[in-house]
Amino acid sequence: MFKDEEQKLEKYDVIIVGTGVAGLFTALSISPNYKVLIVSKDKIENSDSYLAQGGICTLKEPGDFDSFLEDTLRAGRYENNQDSVRVMIENSPMIMERLVEYGVEFDLNKDGTYEYTREGAHSTYRILHHKDVTGKEITNKLLACVKKRQNITLREYTKMIDIIIEDNVCRGVIMSYKNEVRPFFAREVVLATGGIGGLFTHSTNFRHITGDSFALALRHGIKLQNINYIQIHPTTLYEKDINRKFLISESVRGEGGILLNKAGERFVDELLPRDVVTDAIKKQMEADGRSFVMLSIKHMPKEEIIRRFPNIYRHCREVGYDLAKEDIPVTPAQHYLMGGILADTYGRTSVEHLFAVGETACNGVHGANRLASNSLLESLVFAERAGWIISEEIDNIPYVQSEVSLDRYENTEKWDEENRQIIMDEIKRRDREFYDKWCDQ
């Protein structure tokens, strides 16, 4: 039983679990009058947001609203929550302004206007970017702003073990900090832990992103939605015996990159939605008897490739490929979760005072398949709205310190393995076909 020893008792107004753009932006959107703790299971910078390459969608003019909406719905197979999609699109210009205020730099044309790009399933150019490291640029600038806030405490290598819930009310989080498992209490808790890539043998995600929030949701009866809607990215660099796959951004295909089979023939329209392209690649690999297909962007001048995709070009050179001179082998890998903890457009879940934002949340904006470059936008829009509502209601929420038994967490490795099995069993229950096709055991 946890003893009320003053040196171990920690309480905050808000605890945010996760240091990707969703967690950081939520913190920045909360009034600085409140004490906020943000924790990361790994290094603070090691979030999947940091890895995002292609860019971030925005409504660049009012006349594009209907097209942006339709592109998102079509990619999501019309299973999207249209209210959520509208909120995302309507708020996108404001989010871009806020990012620029926080110091984010987007690529510009020679005349000083924004340089937009296009990716698969987009009917026009509406994606802002910072070279091919947009996620890194946004994450770094938000993190710098968070570090300047006196009301915010950042901790890395702090692992969420469980959520403290009483009578459907969240009271805090049980975490492992400095090799000790103990409770942290808060009036509001925000889950921004990302997706489930670490559960897959081949994924673009960091290995520590293991769906902890979803396992705890299943343990506590917190409502989930579409947990089996898992996106497989069509193009990651094929490197034998490398588990975390290096993403070859969809913007490479958006700028004219083509996919080729074993005979050097183009076999698919590269700008179709991701799930369609992924299925075509998988079928072609089976037909070719190979674990990859080839991607060619040799039509672009070398200087343009280096300018537009410096990170991708550099990584490919490091492993022996020159994008300007040769095709590169690519293969599908787990990339993104469209489902998650059921949340409204303010991040509120089925448990009082528990919020979910970013890839951890499912407000229905993505439907059955995410439109390229909507992930960063979705995370930021709904994170900001969560921060707003938290600031509005927190003064009316009492701080409650509960008595917590820690006996069940003595073997954290066993607890983690149980969590993994809980999630995989739920995916299998909901979609056996997907499970057999993509889920490694």
Image (cartoon, rainbow, N blue to C red):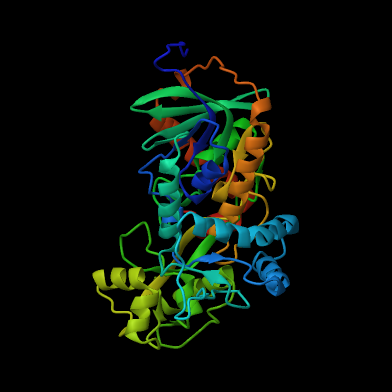
Along the viewing direction, whichever of 3 and 130 lies nearer the viewer: 130
Q: Quadrant of residue 297?
A: bottom left
Query: Which one is nearer the viewer's eye here, 256 or 216?
Result: 256
Q: Quadrant of residue 68?
A: bottom right
Task: Tell me what residue is drawn at x 51 percent, y 56 percent.
Answer: 101
Q: Is there any visible trace of residue 54 in the rendered image?
A: yes
Residue drawn at x 53%, y 79% as measured from the top left: 270
Total tally of numbered discs in the picture: 0
Q: Nearer the viewer, residue 265 or 248?
A: 248
Q: Quadrant of residue 6?
A: top left
Q: Is residue 160 above or below residue 81?
A: above
Q: Residue 411, how many percent across, how many down?
A: 40, 26
* Residue 200 in sight from this viewpoint: no
Residue 239: x and y in percent read: 32, 66
Residue 366 vertical position relative to residue 235 in the rendered view, above or below: above
**Residue at the image position 36 percent from the left and 37 percent from the top:** 157
Residue 89, image x, y percentages: 67, 62
Instruction: Point out residue 38 in the picture as x, y percentages from the top left corner.
Output: 46, 37
From this view, report whether residue 220 is shown above or below residue 90: above
Residue 406 or residue 348, whichever sits in front: 348
Instruction: Please report the residue visible at 72 percent of the width from the left and 56 percent of the height from the top.
Output: 81
